[in-house]
Amino acid sequence: MARKPTKDKLLSTLDDIEVLSRELIEMLALSRTQKLPQPGEDTDILELLVQRDREFQELMQTALEQGRVQQEMQALEKEVEKRDSDIQQLQKQLKEAEHILATAVYQAKEKLKSIEKARKGSISSEEIIKYAHRISASNAVCAPLNWVPGDPRRPYPTDLEMRSGILGNMSNMPTNGVNGHLPGDYVSLMFIFANVFLLSLLDILTPQYPWQSADVSMGILPPHHGNDFGLEPPGHNKENEDDVEAMSTDSSSSSSDSD
Amino acid sequence: MAGVMETEEQARHRFQLELEFVQCLANPNYLNFLAQRGYLREKPFVNYLKYLLYWKEPEYAKFLKYPHCLHMLELLQYEHFRKELVNAQCAKFIDEQQILHWQHYSRKRTRLQQALVEQQQQQPQAPSHGNTTSK
């Protein structure tokens, strides 16, 4: 239920007073010339006038109070605005602080990771120097100072060295020479990943070149693997190849490799 | 994957085999040979190359005499490289570059020695300057 605004009430009361006072004045003006048509009418109008005046006074009081209340409201609103801006400021500062802390934490974590990595890869300098001696002494990483084109030495095992190793003696398949290298012994190298049972049939041959023996007595073993390299390693969602020795001639499968 | 239990003897032998094989990969002519016979296209072989990456770990790498093989092994993981190796010119180029790189240190050393010799030749010409300014 909507209350009539004080302003309208005031204005309507004023209108009433205006009407009543006009009537009264007309009556007074008329009474000069003629007698009152109704004897009690002037008292009625006067009563009404007084009543309306009283109402007017009350409404004025109400209006004054409402004005005061309105001022209080405004003051409170200003307070609210001030507090609001304070809260927003604090919020901004909090966000900034959080951002700075998050960056700091992140960088600290990165640093820890790199420390861990460095620690994991630490090798004693002795070992590194020993290894450096080994690979330099055999001219594997640095050419001999008197090397000229035509010298048969190379930074990789030559076919002579390959043939005289274990791999080279695993099978004897005569084929033609290619580019001066005999591939017949190379072919034999291919079976090592397919035929594990061959290993048990071979005797351990004494190596003739140091790159082939490598301190086997130190007890280091190669990582264990399921012997079937035809199967996909875990983590790939490609077709499985059950038969290891079947050669895949389907070139489209290798082109769909996503490395 | 089904694993066949192998004796320590067999494991040691397999170690030697794999050591030899991985070092053979340093030979670009051998790689060309493998590529031309289509071994590099086979999925089992590609998986085996990936398995051989364990030679990069320090406890295994210390046995390698020809460290170039590790770089070749890494390159072999990429199919593009495996495809390119079929060309003989590609293998020849790799061979040449490899040998040139191999000679890098000795070339640097000869250059340093030459520079040292030149410096020593210049020094006898200016000993008087040093004596007058030594005070």
Image (tube, coloured by chain):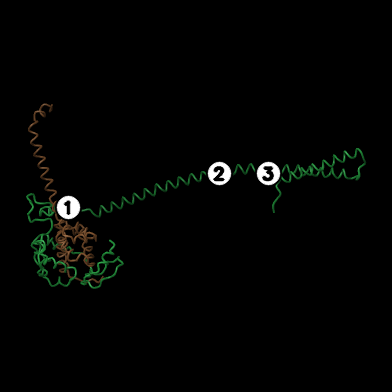
Chain colours: A green, B brown
Above or below, A161 relative to A142? below
Task: Please indicate whether residue A224 sits to the left or right of residue A62 in the image.
Answer: left
What percent of the width, then of the height, locates residue A27? 87, 41
Sooner in the amino-acid sequence: mark 2 or mark 1: 2
Same chain letter for marks 3 and 2: yes
Please tell me whether mark 3 sits on a helix, a strand or a loop: helix
Q: Residue at coordinates 26% horizontally, 65% vertically from top-left?
A: A254
Quadrant (top left, top right, bottom left, bottom right) of the N terminus of chain B: bottom left
**What's under tag 1, amino acid-wise?**
Ile
Sooner in the amino-acid sequence: mark 1 or mark 3: 3
Contact check, label 2 and label 1, Cβ < 8 Å: no
Quadrant (top left, top right, bottom left, bottom right) of the C terminus of chain B: top left
Sooner in the amino-acid sequence: mark 3 or mark 2: 3
The residue where tag 3 is placed is A66
The residue where tag 2 is placed is A81
The residue where tag 1 is placed is A128
Q: How many marks?
A: 3
**What's under tag 2, amino acid-wise?**
Glu
Cα separation, mark 1 vs mark 3, equals 92 Å
Above or below, B109 relative to B122? below
- Mark 3 surroundings within 10 Å by alpha-carbon count, few (fewer than 14), some (14 through 19), many (20 or more): few
Please tell me whether mark 1 sits on a helix, a strand or a loop: helix
